[in-house]
Image (tube, rainbow, N blue to C red):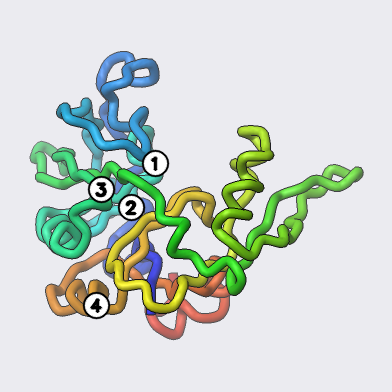
């Protein structure tokens, strides 16, 4: 079984969702190639410029922090303990860089991920669902099923699209091929833009270590199914 890492929605645990709603950004962050928010899916050999996250006044510090400001998008913000566990199972999946979190007048050490690659070759496309977002003549958006059954077909379909169309195409329901032994991997073109996925083995290690602020969504559920049909029975109301 594989799971998509989700931020906890339980305010009894996180205090406030999102926990990081503001940040201090370096000068000229939007045009600086060394700013972490401008780096995606590639390994770097330098220390990037980082945002400083500001903890919401009602939020609590957890091992996994939810963050929405510039620089944090499509990355995970984790404690040293969580970073070490993830590196133990998948040190070739991402780099981590120190990212300070400001709580009142104190700064705490956290780490921000830089994902290195995406692992579409692990996906069983015959059992997965690929959709693209369309708009009808009345201007209403809807999702259209795309008939994809292999990794090669998926790559070919993306290659045939414009950059805008690519961003509208997602694997709406993800299934992983049998026999996959990889414990941690990343996928783009999924709900939320980019997802971090872990095996049952990693989940049990995180639970045993008491890692907080994290929820585990079974990989084959859509976000709608998870939020409205399954999540509440496991983690309680958001």
Instruction: Give the residue at mark 2.
Output: 66
Residue at figure coordinates x 26%, y 28% from the top left: 24
Mark 3 or mark 4: whose residue is earlier in sequence: 3
Nearest to the observer: residue 75 or residue 197: 197
**From this viewpoint, which residue is outermost toward the right?**
137
Residue ID at (11%, 54%): 80
SS for dot 1: loop
- The quadrant the N terminus occupies is bottom left
Quarter of the view holding residue 15: bottom left
In front: mark 2 or mark 3? 3
Sequence-wise, which precedes: disc 2 or disc 3? 2
Tag shown at residue 94: 3
Image disc number at residue 135:
none
Q: Position of residue 181 (x, y in %)?
A: 30, 72
For marks 1 and 3, give the one nearer the viewer: 3
Distance (Cα) linking label 1 and label 3 = 15 Å
* Marks 3 and 4 in Cβ contact (< 8 Å): no
Q: Residue 133: x and y, percent?
A: 71, 49
Calculate the distance from the C-alpha at mark 2 to the C-alpha at mark 4. 23 Å
Q: Which residue is mark 1?
A: 73
Crowdedness near tag 4: few (<14), some (14–19) or many (≥20) residues, C-alpha within 10 Å: few
Q: Between marks 2 and 3, how big is the CA–CA gap?
A: 18 Å
Residue at 80% across, 45% down = 135
Camera-nearest label, 1 or 2: 1
Question: Could one spot residue 93 in this view of the protein?
Answer: yes
What residue is pinned by disc 4?
201
């Amino acid at each position: 079984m594989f799971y998509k890492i989700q931020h906890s929605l339980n305010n009894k645990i996180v205090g406030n969702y999102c926990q990081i709603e503001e940040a201090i950004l370096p000068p000229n962050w939007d045009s600086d190639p060394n700013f972490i928010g401008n780096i995606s899916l590639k390994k770097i050999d330098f220390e990037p410029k980082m945002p400083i996250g500001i903890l919401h006044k009602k939020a609590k510090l957890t091992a996994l922090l939810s963050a929405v400001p510039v620089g944090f998008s499509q990355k995970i913000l984790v404690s040293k303990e969580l970073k070490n566990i993830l590196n133990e199972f998948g040190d070739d999946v991402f780099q981590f860089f120190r990212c300070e979190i400001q709580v009142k007048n104190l700064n705490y050490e956290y780490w921000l991920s830089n994902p290195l690659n995406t692992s579409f070759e692990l996906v069983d496309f015959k059992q997965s669902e690929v959709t693209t977002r369309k708009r009808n003549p009345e201007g209403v958006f809807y999702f259209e099923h795309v008939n994809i059954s292999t990794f090669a077909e998926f790559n070919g379909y993306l290659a045939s699209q414009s950059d805008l169309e690519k961003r509208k195409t997602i694997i709406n329901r993800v299934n992983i091929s049998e026999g996959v032994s990889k414990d941690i991997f990343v996928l783009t073109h999924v709900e939320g833009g980019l997802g971090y996925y872990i095996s049952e083995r990693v989940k049990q290690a995180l639970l045993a270590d008491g890692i907080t602020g994290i929820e585990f969504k079974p990989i084959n559920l859509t976000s709608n199914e998870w939020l409205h049909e399954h999540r509440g029975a496991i983690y309680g109301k958001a």
